[in-house]
Image (cartoon, helix red, strand yellow):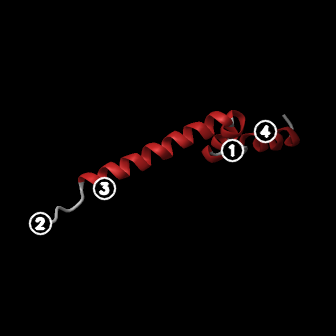
Amino acid sequence: MNIKESTENQKMKKVTPPSFIKLAMRNMVKKGRQSIFHFGLTAIGFIIFILIIAFLGRPTLPH
């Protein structure tokens, strides 16, 4: 094994895997419409959840 081969092996070992953000964005681009649909469902569910919490936690005013 000569010096050139060892430096090439070191370069190959230093390659880091892609970050989770890059993987998530790549996956979102691949699945496109399904990702947007799931995001919409999540947003609507979150808004409904917040409205329910606001309704249950509203102050009661004396008459």
Q: CA distance from mark 4 to mark 3?
A: 59 Å
Amino acid type, mark 1: Thr
Residue visible at 24% across and 59% down in the picture: 58
Mark 3 and mark 2 residues within 8 Å of each other at the beta carbon: no
Local SS, label 2: loop
Residue visible at 73% across and 43% down in the picture: 15
Q: Which residue is mark 1?
A: 16
Q: Closer to us: mark 1 or mark 3?
A: 3
Q: Where residue 36 sits in the image (x, y, percent)?
A: 62, 40
Q: Earlier in the sequence, mark 4 or mark 2?
A: 4
Amino acid type, mark 2: Pro
Q: CA distance from mark 4 to mark 2?
A: 77 Å
Q: Earlier in the sequence, mark 1 or mark 3?
A: 1
Q: Where residue 11 sits in the image (x, y, percent)?
A: 78, 44
Mark 4 and mark 2 residues within 8 Å of each other at the beta carbon: no
Amino acid type, mark 4: Asn
Q: Which residue is mark 3?
A: 54
Q: Which residue is mark 4?
A: 9
Q: Please give the label number shown on residue 62.
A: 2
14 displayed left or right of 1: left
Residue 7 image-quadrant placement: top right
Local SS, label 3: helix
In this rendered view, identify the residue nearer to me: 8 or 46.
46
